[in-house]
Image: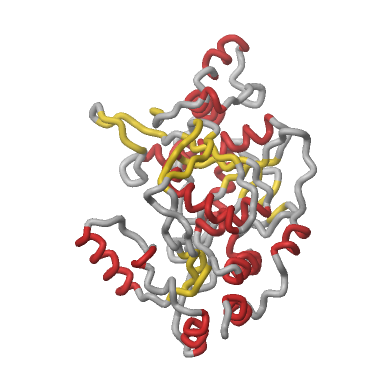
Amino acid sequence: MITYKDLANYIFQDVNETIEDLEKRFPQRTLPLNAEVTRFAPSPTGFLHLGSLFTSLVACKVAHDTNGVFYIRLEDTDTKREIEGSGEQLITQLEHFGVIPDEGYLGNSEKGIYGPYVQSKRAHIYRVCIKYLMEQGRAYPCFCSHEQIEEIRAVQEAMKVVPGYYGEYAMCRNISPEEALNRIKAGEKYVIRFRSLGNHNDKVTFHDLIRGDISIAQNDLDVVIMKSDGLPTYHFAHAVDDHFMRTTTVLRGEEWIASVPIHLELFKALNFPLPNYAHLPVIMKLDNGNRRKLSKRKDPEASVAHFIEEGFPKESLKAYLMSIANSNFEEWTTINHSFDIDEFKFSFDKMSLDGVLF
């Protein structure tokens, strides 16, 4: 009888390491008590958005206020959307505004012992972890075509049920390891999905450093964790990278709150401790009296390059971003006669819960 362990050994014949081996290769960091390890993880798919500068500025500030580490990781697994040279350009623009990583991806090079810091170079690490999940029966090959996925969605829309690949709609979820192995040997294309144990009718609660406790529907989607090209999806890479790079606090935009249940379940399945989460407010603007997100297409100020090309003083933009990050920054500058954000003590308690106006 073919088991999931047999299936994993066949698919991942090149993988000899275990998660325990990775734990030894990427040991816990030796840092002062309460030091934070934060990161900025852009994708090389275009220009540096003002919101990304905002996020990276806060992440850098949090790490350095606690004598911790701020690093940059390039998330380049979406090869179809990648724009050549944009990764290097992102680093140049961040450096212009004084957002300098202590380690990580530096454009044409990398610095640090927790790399590679470019996701496309970390395939072996992901394969070790996916092999482990498959051995536990928490990951499985999916042979569904794009057309079949669309058919599932059409049925769900007609029945007015929650859309997605889950439960009875997960066509490959209950395929036996033996059948899966035979189909792989026959040359069928496949992705690998995570087998969720959640129920979207139940809630999961997590603590956000800005928003407090958040209760949200559990994940029950069998999300893809490895694409047909062998690269991971964002959700899976996030869990693996933030664990082995020893990230303590994940700072990102509030639009990622809906994805947290997926990440919580992945961390638990991999037996990884959870990082702290801080979901930053989205930068908004007024348009005919209405608030809306800055648009890459409509708003030139959405691009950081706009401020560089127009000659805006970089310290002024940094100070303004810090003033919308912490409500007491403006008062602090008045009292201290300084706009040097390095001297200012950042606090999550002073962040807005709603979209901030730029």
Which residue does the image show at 48% across and 79% down from the upper left?
176
Q: Quadrant of the C terminus?
A: top left
Relative depth, front residue between 334 and 247? 247
In the image, residue 73 lies at what x, y percent?
Answer: 60, 52
Image-based side of 36 in relation to 193, left or right:
right
Q: Total marks drawn? A: 0
Q: Residue furthest top?
A: 335
Q: Is residue 121 visible?
A: no
- Residue 103 at x, y = what percent? 70, 48
- Apparent side of residue 156 relative to residue 340 in the rendered image (left or right): left
Query: Residue at image x 50%, y 72%?
Result: 140
Residue 137 pos. (x, y %): 55, 69
Which residue is depicted at the point 56% across and 58% down?
Answer: 237
Q: Residue furthest left?
A: 158
Please tell me in which quadrant of the rendered image residue 340 appears: top right
Nearer to us in this view, 254 or 292: 254
Left/right of residue 7 with respect to residue 198 in the rendered view: right
**Splitting the image into 4 quarters, where does residue 171 fall?**
bottom left
**Residue 47 higher or lower than 352, as above or below:** below
- Quadrant of residue 170 within the rendered picture: bottom left
Along the line of sight, which residue is nearer the eye, 95 or 166? 166
Q: Which residue: 57% across, 70% down?
A: 134
**In the image shown, does 350 or 168 lie closer to the viewer?**
168
Residue 139 higher or lower than 279, as above or below: below
Q: Position of residue 213 (x, y in %)?
A: 49, 34
Confirm whether residue 262 shows in the render.
yes
